[in-house]
Amino acid sequence: MGVKDEPWVKENPDRVKLLGPVCVAYGHPDLERTHTYLTDFGLVESFRKDEAIYYRGYGVQPVVYIAKKTAVPEFLGVYFEAAGLADLEKATKIPGAGAILDFAAGGKVVQIIDPSGIPFHVVCGLEKREFTPPKENSQPYNFPSPTDDDVEAKPRRGVFHRMKKGVIPVHKLGHCGLIAKDFDISFDFYCYHFNFKPSDVVLGPDGSMMMVFLHVDLGKSYSEHHSFFVAQPQGLLQPGKPHHAAFEVNSIESQFIGHDYLSHKGYTSFWGVGRHIEGSQVFDYWFDLDGFLVEHYTDGDLVNEDTPIGWIKRDPKDGNNWGPALPQLK
């Protein structure tokens, strides 16, 4: 079992076709305290129901984050959108799956408990919202040129580049990662039962599997370099737990403005701002108030069925093209 066995190409007539991630759900003991953090992070409250707060971004999904009232902090799973009702019905056949139920944010949902005991959800029938991007907070860039009369290299003319500070709006949930109890079993599970395919496989210095970045395989159509990943335990990142959830923002300028805003609010930064190797995203990781990792990202790679799988051998600390070194999770 494992990556080299290529479970994503194995014949499975009941393989569930996913379109992409929708939202994540976390349990928090203090919802109002969490609400303050999430709105500072750039999420917008959509509605409240049954001791839970549902948040959206400015993208088309009606929900990107669900905060539920729980006695202790816990990860309650990630939600992916099925291509149709037939795929939702296929999801009920996966080991660990429950029945089709109503989803509070609309449509229907199936919960699956994966081999590590982590909830994974498949949803269908969501009513999409209008795409409402924020007004651009920056001006075009001026680049070096032999002359200032070059309007192509220097398009910003007579306009000043002065940006508004504050909360940076989130677009969507881009990806989520899990720490597997058994790496090969979890990898096989997700690639056999769903249309996940590796984009990059990260190997440690000894050649062992550290992490596999998975994209939703849509054939010739492009999708993000990874919308899901499976990782080995590392430090505080223990098996059966989430790694992090990542939310897209609209620009690199936004990354730095958001970083400064969260810093000034006194929140705890983990890693960033920098640019990843795998996926190329500009990243900025933060701890939420209950110790979960969340990320702002922008400018990620797109792949399709013609993109070759990358096999990358590196030290765990070398996770970026530029930016601060990866801190140790002890």
Image: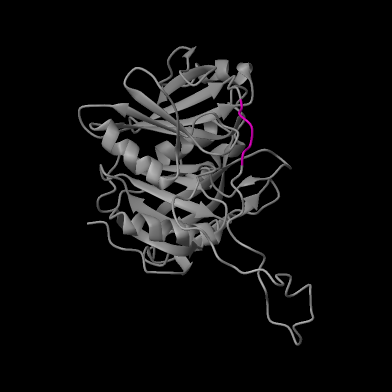
Q: Nearer the viewer, residue 288 or 96?
A: 288
Q: Quadrant of the C terminus?
A: bottom left
> Quadrant of the rendered structure where residue 241 is?
top left
The residue depicted at 49 percent of the width and 30 percent of the height is 63
The residue depicted at 63 percent of the width and 26 percent of the height is 83
The residue depicted at 42 percent of the width and 50 percent of the height is 295
Q: Position of residue 153 (x, y in %)?
A: 74, 75
The residue depicted at 29 percent of the width and 41 percent of the height is 239
Q: Vertical placement of 102 versus 308: above or below?
A: above
What range of the chain is rendered magenta?
Answer: 128-132
Q: Seen in the image, is 329 located left or right of residue 308?
A: left
Q: Position of residue 125 (x, y in %)?
A: 59, 19
Q: Seen in the image, is 157 located left or right of residue 241?
A: right
Q: Can the viewer see residue 162 in this picture?
A: yes
Q: Vertical placement of 159 versus 85: above or below?
A: below
Q: Position of residue 226 (x, y in %)?
A: 54, 47
> Quadrant of the rendered structure where residue 186 is?
top left
Magenta region's main secondary structure?
loop
Q: Does the magenta run of residues contain 50?
A: no
